[in-house]
Image (spheres, helix red, strand yellow):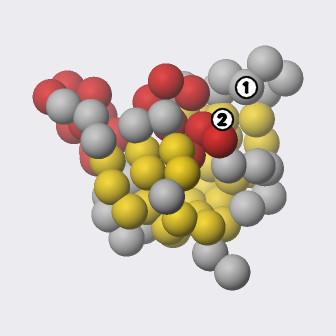
Amino acid sequence: MKELGKIKVGKNVKVMKVCGEGAIKRRIMDMGITKGANIFIRKTAPLGDPIEISIRGYELTIRKADANIILVEECE
């Protein structure tokens, strides 16, 4: 498993675990990023923050610090 923030642009991944606590975990889960969800990495800013993703038909922007508490596995 890898952190979402370390996945390259153009890859599809599957969420395995959200590691945060409290308000941070709640904010991520409110965006629909839950275990088993498929995410497509659309774009990353030049310095790596923020990261643009597509999940369940929505396009979202997530901070790199938040992305690093989301553990994912690459899909083939």
* Residue 52, quarter of the rendered image: top right
Q: Position of residue 21 (x, y in %)?
A: 19, 31
Q: Please indicate whether residue 35 sits to the left or right of residue 57 in the image.
A: left
Viewer-nearest residue: 10 or 76: 76
The answer to whether residue 44 of the structure is visible from this angle is: yes
Is any atom of residue 32 visible in this view? no
**Which image quadrant: the C terminus?**
bottom right
The secondary structure type at the circle numbered 1 is loop
Kindly state the secondary structure of the residue where label 2 is placed: strand
In the image: residue 46, left or right of residue 27:
right
- To which quarter of the image does residue 69 belong? top left
Name, please, the residue furthest toward the top.
47
Label of residue 48 in the image? 1
> Within 10 Å of the Cα at label 2, are there few (<14), some (14-19), or many (20+) other Cα atoms?
many
Farthest residue, direction bottom? 76
Nearest to the observer: residue 35 or residue 53: 35
Residue under pointer 2: 51
Amino acid identity at mark 2: Ile
Q: CA distance from mark 1 to mark 2?
A: 7 Å
Tell me where residue 13 appears, x and y as whole percent. Answer: 58, 64
Farthest front residue? 1
What's the amino acid at mark 1?
Answer: Gly
- Label 1: how many residues lie within 10 Å, few (<14), some (14-19) or many (20+)? few
Vertical relation: 28 (above or below) 33: above
| Residues tagged 1 and 2 counted as in contact (Cβ below 8 A) | yes
Vertical placement of residue 31 versus 37, above or below: above
Residue at horizontal 38 percent and vertical 53 percent from the top: 33
